[in-house]
Image (cartoon, coloured by chain):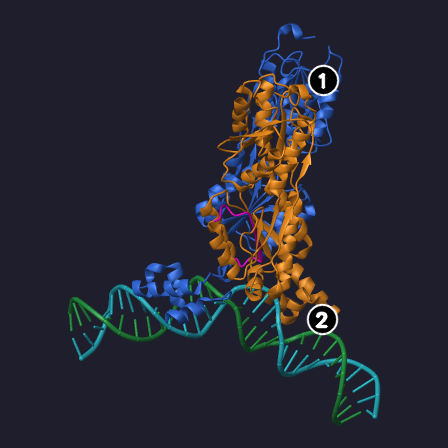
Chain colours: A blue, B orange, C green, D cyan
DNA sequence: ACCGCTTCTTGACTCGTTTCAACTGTCGAA
DNA sequence: TTCGACAGTTGAAACGAGTCAAGAAGCGGT
């Protein structure tokens, strides 16, 4: 029962295997009566197509893999959602692989995916070292779309969000509200996103006389380090203390918010806070958090569409680098104008 | 270059395909010199095994599927993590499928997985209607492990967490802190978890004289409905207002917390709050949230282990139903004793 | 020179599907 | 009566890897 092949079905229906295959793949080629008989045989036998055999014949599978840095990160789960939505009615299946920021795991996944001859890979690579492995994939004929990493080389498509612009948006907003001493709480500057967001903010701040952007570089982008950063900011002498904090992600921002609340500093009255990513809980925080939102689903959807394009274009495909614009969502945590008197 | 088979390798190395296969699968059978030659051929050709062909021959794949209700839900991502950890060194690969609570999507996934002859399926089914489909899978020889759903029928293994106990833990805790008027904020009672948690709490409350559990049934388990529930609770006449709220999940609890804060009610002073699930942000809320924690990774890990067991046991496998115990994590939101004077 | 033994190596066959050239009927037109 | 056209149907030949009975080669002993 577990192993019923097309051959069994053919025997049962009194036709050849070719006909069964036709019923399955080009039903209109088969006479209605025959088709009926075959379908009955299929259902009484409980026959289920064997995908391995199909793939072997076809030379490739119909699955698309999404390799993410962290399955539990809402950013990536939304990207996956978008990709799924785009591929839903193309007959392909999406499988999600979790590299967990571990190069070895990523490698293992890519090896396995190549053995599976997947149709294509959407990936946020762990580091630049992945590039050699990805080049190999591409040379072996498996299209690769980079997600949230601008492609340095031009031999692949990519989708990303403009982090520099995100930094500019946040800084512009805070400057408009009258803030002149602004803190940037970030993670390791080795992370491109962290550095880019800083660069954008710094560029805008530099254009404003008397405005200063003070950098706090934390070891990781977590709530705990957010609290620590909050301490450092709050400990500054009142006359030099930043009146606003822009954080590289929302977890840091929530940490900062907690610490301010703990110390009885009012948000946004004493300190305004802007986060980044607009995670689900940003709006649900004690003081709803302003945040730079990225079009996450769109990112996944577009990546998938680029992939479909690349597959169907074949040889004459031109790789594209798509860059999306983030949007600032202003909520209570930064929504007050600093009275001029508060300066200096 | 894209299509290199074992045959190419054999030609290149001047051996037969059988020998190449042996190098790949039982290297010790091959003389070192030959092995070396084959390995060189493999690397100069950039040969990559074709998994479809292997699977076709083997009769089944080496992947295990996890079908979850919602990829973005931390509960499930942790379950996936656990399963991955357990299967990491078994040579199997984990793929994640997202049913998104949609029976049709779930069906499509299961169909596809069966065609792929996956080694096994860990699934939290959308509803009881899935059972027929799952029975079919099992009859076709694919082991199914139910996650977070007690198995009604005995033809499959399952892992779950005791939600009734979770309700008891929360209620016991609140009663011990002196609360007698307790609210249960839940979602649709059609959801087994919601009903079970209520049942547990109700049972304990019923044992305590003068204690009352008031039910607030919201349409969904979201922060927004948490706020709404918070309004209802707070609007009660002070003499009848609950002094504690037990929520069916943390999102509801965060909503309640927000609403209380908005109205200037002190948590836990005026109202104590206990949530459920212990999501990442529970501890990071404005007032750190007490919550009933489930051993999520353990759930996934155990499910995977049951699967591995079932595969290796073969015919003589006895299905098991594993039930884990949740744990109450007490944090600030419920951590104060109600003074007796506050009663009535 | 032959035997028995071990150590490698071979290649035809198998897995289940798709494909496609070839075949069988049937019908209408010339 | 023969011919082509057409609609269905057939079955052998792939696809790539794993298996295993059988064979080859080497070696020591008699």
Label 1 resides on the chain identified as: A
Q: Nearer the viewer, mark 1 or mark 2?
A: 1
Q: Secondary structure at mark 2?
A: helix
In this figure, which residue is indicated by the disc labeled 2? B29
Residue A124: image x %, image y %?
A: 61, 41
- Badge 1: how crowded within 10 Å, few (<14), some, or many (20+)? few
Residue B264: image x %, image y %?
A: 60, 16
Front residue of B262 and B202: B202
Quadrant assignment, res A242: top right
- Badge 2: how crowded within 10 Å, few (<14), some, or many (20+)? few
Q: Main secondary structure of the magenta part?
A: loop
The part of the chain drawn in magenta is B115-128
Front residue of B232 and B39: B232
Q: In the image, is residue B121 part of the stretch drawn in magenta?
A: yes
Whether callout 1 and callout 2 share a subunit is answered no
Numbered-mark total: 2
Front residue of B80 and A232: B80
Which image quarter holds the C terminus of chain B?
Answer: top right
Which image quarter holds the N terminus of chain B?
Answer: bottom right
Whether D28 is drawn above or below D18: the answer is below
> Would you say B76 lies left or right of B188 here?
right
Whether B70 is drawn above or below A187: the answer is below
In this figure, which residue is indicated by the disc labeled 1? A263
Q: CA distance from mark 1 to mark 2?
A: 70 Å
Whether A93 is drawn above or below B199: the answer is below
Residue B247: image x %, image y %?
A: 58, 32
Q: Secondary structure at mark 1?
A: loop
Specify the farthest residue to the front.
Answer: B209
């Amino acid at each position: 029962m577990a192993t019923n092949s097309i051959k069994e079905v053919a025997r049962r229906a009194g036709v050849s295997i070719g006909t069964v295959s036709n019923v399955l793949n080009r039903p209109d080629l088969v006479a209605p009566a025959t088709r009926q008989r075959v379908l009955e045989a299929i259902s009484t036998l409980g026959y289920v197509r064997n995908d391995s055999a199909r793939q072997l014949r076809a030379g490739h599978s119909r699955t698309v893999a999404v390799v993410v840095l962290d399955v539990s990160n809402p950013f990536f789960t939304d990207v996956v959602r978008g990709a799924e939505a785009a591929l839903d009615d193309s007959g392909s299946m999406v499988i999600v692989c979790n590299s967990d920021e571990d190069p070895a795991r990523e490698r293992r996944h890519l090896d396995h995916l190549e053995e599976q001859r997947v149709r294509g890979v959407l990936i946020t690579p762990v580091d630049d070292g992945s590039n050699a492995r990805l080049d190999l994939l591409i040379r072996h004929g498996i299209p690769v779309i980079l997600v949230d990493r601008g492609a340095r080389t031009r031999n692949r498509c990519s989708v990303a969000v403009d982090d520099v612009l995100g930094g500019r948006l946040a800084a512009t907003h805070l400057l408009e509200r009258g803030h002149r001493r602004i803190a940037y709480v970030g993670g390791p500057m080795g992370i491109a996103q962290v550095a880019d967001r800083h660069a954008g903010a710094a560029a805008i701040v530099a254009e404003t006389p008397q405005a200063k952007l003070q950098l706090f570089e934390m070891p990781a982008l977590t709530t705990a380090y957010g609290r620590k950063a909050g301490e450092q900011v709050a400990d500054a002498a009142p006359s030099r203390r930043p009146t606003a904090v822009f954080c590289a992600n929302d977890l840091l921002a929530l940490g900062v918010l907690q610490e301010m609340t703990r110390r009885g500093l009012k948000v946004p009255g004493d300190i305004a806070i802007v986060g980044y990513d607009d995670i689900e809980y940003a709006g649900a925080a004690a003081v709803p958090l302003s945040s730079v939102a990225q079009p996450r689903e769109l990112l996944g959807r577009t990546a998938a569409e680029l992939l479909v394009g690349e597959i169907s274009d074949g040889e004459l495909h031109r790789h594209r680098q798509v860059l999306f614009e983030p949007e600032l969502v202003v909520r209570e945590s930064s929504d007050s104008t600093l009275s001029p008197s508060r300066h200096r």
